[in-house]
Amino acid sequence: MGRKPKDQEESVVNRIEELRLAKGISRQQLADAVGVHYQTVGYIERGEYSPSLVLALQIAKVLGTPVEKIFKLEEEN
Amino acid sequence: MGRKPKDQEESVVNRIEELRLAKGISRQQLADAVGVHYQTVGYIERGEYSPSLVLALQIAKVLGTPVEKIFKLEEEN
DNA sequence: CAAGGATGTTGCAATATTGCTACATAGCAT
DNA sequence: ATGCTATGTAGCAATATTGCAACATCCTTG
């Protein structure tokens, strides 16, 4: 599928790289664990994409951390 | 924007209607609170769409319930 | 019977997300 | 230097998500 990662209103920040490194796994391993491409993980870590809910739930499960602790909304209040 | 709600691998179930009614608010009110269309809330409640992560986080915030308690992955294990 | 609110459903357009391929760099080992 | 791994970056195609308009039904309430 696909397109190129682009703009998108700068809506979510995440701590997945930090948590991933704490578990000592690579992007490729995390990608395999949740069933996506390693580039997709990269785009999400850099904040170029905010993931779908399913993907976010799977990542949270693998990292053993609740969704709200990993992803935080910006432009709050 | 748009297209029509379609297939999509049946991936997530949710309890947002239950929680919304418990708060006594309509779809329109929930939609206003999170900044989407009321039809969008309908599609999500019926499971025709799984929302984006941002929308899921906003809904969870409005309903005062963590994301994992509202949305559950299917086809687990 | 109006009139209105909440909801369901369909259609089309615009944008976001993902898969996948290909190429680049840097580091670390052999 | 050659290889391998991890990562960044770009493009294209396919699909998912959202906005929005128009219509419907079902329930109230006047």
Image (spheres, coloured by chain):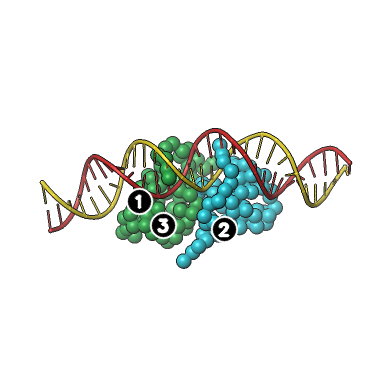
Chain colours: A green, B cyan, C red, D yellow
Q: Which residue is mark 3?
A: A34
Tell whether A76 sits left or right of A34: right
Three-letter code for the amino acid on which mark 3 is drawn: Val
Which chain letter matches label 1? A
Q: Secondary structure at mark 2?
A: strand
| A68 and B50: which is toward the camera | B50
Most extreme residue toward the bottom, as rendered? Answer: B77
Parent chain of label 3: A
Labels 1 & 2 near each other (Cβ < 8 A) = no
Which residue corresponds to mark 2?
A: B13
For badge 1, the amino acid type reads Tyr
What residue lies at 65% left-to-right and 55% top-to-bottom? Answer: B17
Identify residue type, mark 2.
Val
- Please name whichever residue, A52 or D4, is drawn nearer the observer in this view of the structure: D4
> For this view, does A69 lie left or right of residue C3?
left
Q: CA–CA distance between discs 3 and 2?
A: 18 Å
Q: Residue at x 53, y 52 (%)?
A: B8
Q: Which residue is mark 1?
A: A38
Task: Please tell me whether mark 3 sits on a helix, a strand or a loop.
Answer: helix
State the quadrant of the N terminus of chain A.
top left
> Mark 1 and mark 2: span between their CA atoms?
27 Å
Percent x, y of residue A9: 48, 38
Within 10 Å of the Cα at label 1, are there few (<14), some (14-19), or many (20+) other Cα atoms?
Answer: some
Q: What chain does mark 2 sit on?
A: B
Q: Which mark is residue B10?
A: none
Tell me the quarter of the image containing the C terminus of chain A: top right
Q: Position of residue A3 (x, y in %)?
A: 42, 40
Query: Which residue shows up at 37% across the image and 54% down it?
Result: A31
* Of the pair A21 and B71, the residue shown nearer to us: B71
